[in-house]
Amino acid sequence: MSREKSFHHGNLRHALIEAALDLLDTDGSAGVTIRAVAAKAGVSHAAPANHFKDRKALLTGVAKSEFKHIWRQIESGLVSRTTNRARMFLDTIANYAVAHPNRYDLLWRTDLVDHSDADLAPLLDNLYASLCAELAREPSHAGRDIDTVAVALWSMMHGYVSLRLSGMFQPAEDRLTSEPRYEALMSLLLPPVKPAPSRTPKRSTRKA
Amino acid sequence: MSREKSFHHGNLRHALIEAALDLLDTDGSAGVTIRAVAAKAGVSHAAPANHFKDRKALLTGVAKSEFKHIWRQIESGLVSRTTNRARMFLDTIANYAVAHPNRYDLLWRTDLVDHSDADLAPLLDNLYASLCAELAREPSHAGRDIDTVAVALWSMMHGYVSLRLSGMFQPAEDRLTSEPRYEALMSLLLPPVKPAPSRTPKRSTRKA
DNA sequence: TTCATAATATTGACAACGTCAATATTGACT
DNA sequence: AGTCAATATTGACGTTGTCAATATTATGAA
């Protein structure tokens, strides 16, 4: 991000996050030690301290980077889409979770990530507000409280993928419709539609 | 459980789990170190190795004990109840999560608990099968696939409490009905009823 | 009762970890 | 050229999980 391409290493901060992601994918969050990250970036074990005050700050940096990535992915998925936009919002996160289970797990680890971080908290707020805005534009939720629907959808998606990753559930299909389970779950709260208009969301504060 | 009340310490295994629960409640799962648990139980740092081969085994023992506790709580709640039994099943777990956040967090930590443990896995299977059995007895789910409803409910409950504990959501009420949010969420999938008959569940295999 | 043996507990050690202090090196700017 | 802040290194410390070696105790057979 920042163009400080000089000094001893040259943008070590970014290199540390990249190294952390590598270790995260292969060894899980427990494998993301300061020393291993430093070694992978080619610096001494105390070098990261100049950019992240401790391990939690480093992992919070990783989480920030990943939430931004998810946000961009959602945005790019929304531009060309006019129907089922809320659904695509949720699918993007769910797909991310399945594709990068260790990363998804980290994102919600309160012991490893500071969710009240000055940069991270607004990212979460924006995500939630964006989902609410999409739901508000869908006519099928006319008589419903938007926040309740948003919290319900996000909770179900998050709970499902979390319990899947925990091994509590196994992948399966709906016995009646033969849909994949995730499809069947979403249809309970968010029936898919065919036509719809388009753009520009509003804000909302996340309360559950 | 086992009546081996002798040897040096006298039922150290049980004492270790109790000590671990204490540390878990006060300091979170990170505070449950083998050495701290041993110290709290009044033994040397290597004594636990005779009862738990490593830290994961100890925490898996804690999880087993807690899942049994939840199971008993659900059972005792069901005996005198004829309506909304599935709902009470879910409420029991949700209430446990709020009352003991650190314990609930541990239960789903795949890095700390072995969910494929020979004793633990059947507990999870029984819990899921029990929920399915209760849902099957409720007439409101006539045309639905029971597993899909069970997975949806459990996912939403788990996702909601998890995201609450992560700080992603804050406690709030439904804007339309002024119910607490949790009530509003559950009502979306499990509308409460007044009358109903009674007893005896069946089995089901957990697939999602 | 004696004694062998298994079960259980202790002591001591080791490597890996996060973190800190002290020091060294480099870049930027005057 | 020379000062200063930013950045990196080295070395150390306390804590952790785990292992090996040893000691202690209970159990059951002789």
Image: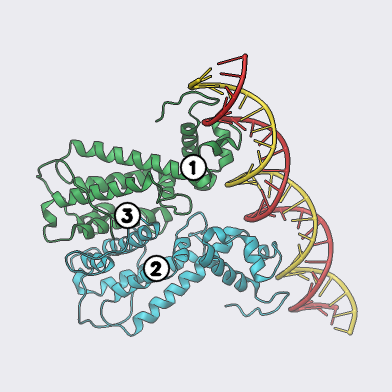
Chain colours: A green, B cyan, C yellow, D red
Calculate the distance from the C-alpha at mark 2 to the C-alpha at mark 1.
Answer: 29 Å
Say whether residue C7 is left or right of residue A62: right
Q: Are marks 2 and 1 on the same chain?
A: no
Given the image, on which type of amino acid does mark 2 rest?
Val
Q: Earlier in the sequence, mark 3 or mark 1?
A: 1
Mark 2 residue element: helix
Mark 3 residue element: loop
Residue B127: x %, y % from top left? 39, 69
Q: Nearer the viewer, residue C8 or A114?
A: A114
In this rendering, the answer to whether B2 lies above or below A126 is below
Say whether residue A151 is left or right of residue B44: left
Q: Are marks 3 and 1 on the same chain?
A: yes
Residue A77: x %, y % from top left? 24, 38
Q: Are marks 2 and 3 on the same chain?
A: no
Q: Are marks 2 and 3 in contact (CB under 8 Å)?
A: no
Given the image, on which type of amino acid does mark 1 rest?
Leu
Residue at 46% across, 24% down: A5
Residue B98, numbered label: 2
* Label 2 CA crowd tier, 10 Å (few <14, some 14–19, many 20+): some
